[in-house]
Image (cartoon, rainbow, N blue to C red):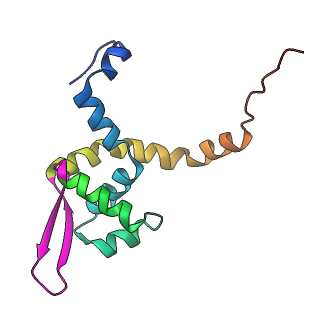
Amino acid sequence: MKIENPNLEDFYKLCPIRSILDRLGDRWTILTLIELEKGVKRFSVLRRSIPDISPRMLSQTVRRLEQDGLVSREVFPTIPPRVEYSITPLGLSFVRSLQVIVEWAADNHDAVKAARAAYAPPTIDLPK
């Protein structure tokens, strides 16, 4: 769906789109999908590849991604059960679309970091 000259207020009222954008814009979603694009991973390997994510958050993230059809989960009947996660074609199509943004972030990381360091919040002059 392409929106020409969008009225942003109307655009944000489109609940189905908004709910998807909210989910896909989450940093854990993006990092998880980028890791799964590299190949099938077990939970523990996936967690090590995203070092600052907690096990609980990773579990919630992969569950939501599976619910949305972006990730598939395969359970192997071993003791203990072995679980592997892989990206689906739908998830892969999202990651490929996201690649331009990831490249932009990598190319501009230093500039954004410098801008953040130089930023001085505005001061509020209170009436005397």
Of residue 1 and residue 56, the one placed in the foreground of this image is 56
Q: In this view of the protein, which residue sits in the foreground, 116 or 47?
A: 47
Instruction: Name above or below for residue 128 compared with residue 80.
Output: above
Give the x, y percent position of residue 38. 28, 64
79 horizontally vs 61: left or right: left
In the image, residue 21 above or below residue 91: above
The picture places residue 96, in percent across and down from the top left corner, at 27, 46
Image quarter where the N terminus lies is: top left
Query: Residue at 41% across / 50% down in the picture?
Result: 27
Q: Quadrant of the C terminus?
A: top right
Q: Residue at x 31, y 15 (%)?
A: 10
Q: Is residue 47 above or below residue 103?
A: below
- Residue 80 counted in the magenta span: yes
The residue located at (75%, 35%) in the rendering is 120
Query: Which residue extends farthest front?
Result: 128
Question: Looking at this view, is 119 or 77 the one in front?
Answer: 77
Residue at (25% x, 52% y) in the render: 64
Residues rendered magenta in the picture: 67-88
Residue 116 rendering spot, x and y as whole percentages:
66, 42
Q: Residue furthest left?
A: 77
Closer to the camera in the image, 28 or 3: 28
Q: Is residue 47 magenta?
A: no
